[in-house]
Amino acid sequence: MIFDDHYSMTIDGEGAVSDATIAVVNPATEEVIAQVPDASRAQLDAAVAAAKRAFPAWSARPIGERQAMIAAIADLMLRHKSEMARLFTAEQGRPLGGAEWEIDVCAQWCQAVAGFTLPVELVEDSDTRRVEIHHRPIGVVGAITPWNAPLLMAIWKMAPALLAGNTVVLKPSPYTPLSTLKLGELLRDLLPAGVLNIVSGGNDLGQWITAHPDIGKVSFTGSTATGKRVMESAAQTLKRVTLELGGNDAAIVLPDVDPKTIAPQLFWGAFFNSAQVCVAIKRLYIHADIYDAVAHELVEFAKTVALGDGAQQGTDLGPVQNGMQYEKVKQLLDDARASGQKFLIGGEASDGPGYFIPISIVDNPPEKSRVVTEEAFGPVLPLLKYEDIEDVIRRANDSETGLGGSVWSNDLDQARAIGARLETGTVWINEMFAFLPNAPFGGHKQSGVGVEHGMAGLLEFTNSQTITSRKLAPAG
Ligand code: NAD
């Protein structure tokens, strides 16, 4: 084990271990780097009970005190940045610079969320009657996160849930629990006992959270298939749910762009984090007039990008995060090769050690091929040629999911008009990954239910309460 092997959960402000453990593997080496507790059902019950006990006092605090504690989470993460980044890279695979970037964004996010308050809306204030709309915390929030961005996904849930006055039971992915468990350990001195509980475990633990009668809301980020199970299970107790799920995002490149200028942005929009980003470019539609030039520039750029162990200096892209995902991406590559598709670069997974898949760019495969219709969540990008705007909008929207999309052009009016017709929760014009604490983020169609971020995201951690008061007529 290269790291300390005392990873503990945080339950009621204390460290908690478990008889059963889960091995955590470094995806760059396939070595087991740590064992973490595999929470029992009794431990989940204890975490939920602690969160329930902590709720009345936490929600009754003046919001200024909760804001101050959320801002303090930012300071604490920045103070421990290099230690957390090392853990992050070892468990997730992303190069150190990208791990540090995630911690910086977490800190910025906490600072921004700390500036939010819960609004009270006055809809009537007449001589006889006053009507106010308040937003009350729900109670205990269950938060479930995936393995591609473990800290950011945790902060995106924790910070607004806590600010609104809820208490939290958070479960990281069993593939990447270390940095989240570490965060819980660091926060034990900052947050009152029971306010934030972090439990590690597998999919069963996730399922127990969605079914737990004392959890009032589940905020889930993960695959569309699991999201459906979460919603089904949460329905038994009518929990509120926010589901941030998968996508197969299209980028549309108009013929007026300069291929060389745009290639690095398109490349990182597709391949950042070895393409394990829910809103990465997963289908790249390029106008026929510049298709060859953009394809050439992308391949030339890809040749400058170093794939390797993220802990080594000079690595730009790490491995795919786990063996299951590696096999899935490998199968997509095999299918593309077996169907006679042409790779402009890459196309063959390495045999390891390490779950390395080279940058793989497929040259204009058929629209119905698996590499186009399935979310790869790995470094395989189909380039697709189009000639007609109506046709490309139809193809971009021809998906059961609708998470994000982007349009690339020097003509901003035209780009925005095209973007407005994409059936997605987010549209980026000439940029990628512009997540903003004050702008809602969520999916259309099977990419999710509800939103995170912005006032709309914050209010998803509350129940609406309308209070009407009528003045009584004077006696006599
Ligand atoms: P996943 O659905 O396999 O797992 C996500 C989490 O759910 C893990 O913590 C897992 O243990 C837990 N889980 C599994 N089964 C469960 C169940 N029955 N009940 C409750 N919890 C359960 O997803 P993943 O493979 O970890 O992540 C990759 C997927 O996440 C991709 O599809 C990606 O697009 C999506 N994603 C979406 C967003 C977004 O904001 N929309 C962000 C990141 C990732």
Image (cartoon, helix red, strand yellow):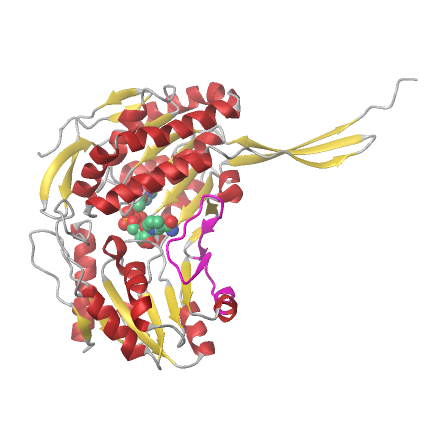
Whether residue 430 is in magenta: the answer is: yes
The structure residue drawn at horizontal position 32% and vertical position 40%, both measured from the top left corner, is 104
Q: Quadrant of the C terminus?
A: top right
Q: What range is drawn magenta here?
A: 418-445
The kind of secondary structure the magenta stretch mainly shows is loop
Q: Position of residue 465 (x, y in %)?
A: 62, 33
Camera-side residue: 413 or 230?
Answer: 413
Q: Is residue 147 above or below residue 368?
A: above
User: Relative to 6, is 447 on the left or the right?
Assistant: right
Camera-side residue: 166 or 411?
Answer: 411
Q: Quadrant of residue 69?
A: top left
The structure residue drawn at horizontal position 44% and vertical position 40%, both measured from the top left corner, is 236
Q: Quadrant of residue 10?
A: top left
Q: Quadrant of the N terminus?
A: top left
Q: Is residue 30 visible?
A: yes
The structure residue drawn at horizontal position 47% and vertical position 63%, both measured from the top left corner, is 423
Q: Is residue 144 visible?
A: no
Q: Quadrant of residue 396?
A: bottom left
User: Relative to 160, is 124 on the left or the right?
Assistant: right
Q: Position of residue 227 (x, y in %)?
A: 37, 49
The structure residue drawn at horizontal position 32% and vertical position 59%, both measured from the top left corner, is 269
How many numbered tags mark residues here? Answer: 0
Q: Position of residue 88 (x, y in %)?
A: 22, 40
Q: Is residue 221 above or below residue 72?
A: below
Q: Is residue 211 above or below residue 262?
A: above
Whether residue 203 is in magenta: the answer is: no
Q: Position of residue 429 (x, y in %)?
A: 44, 62
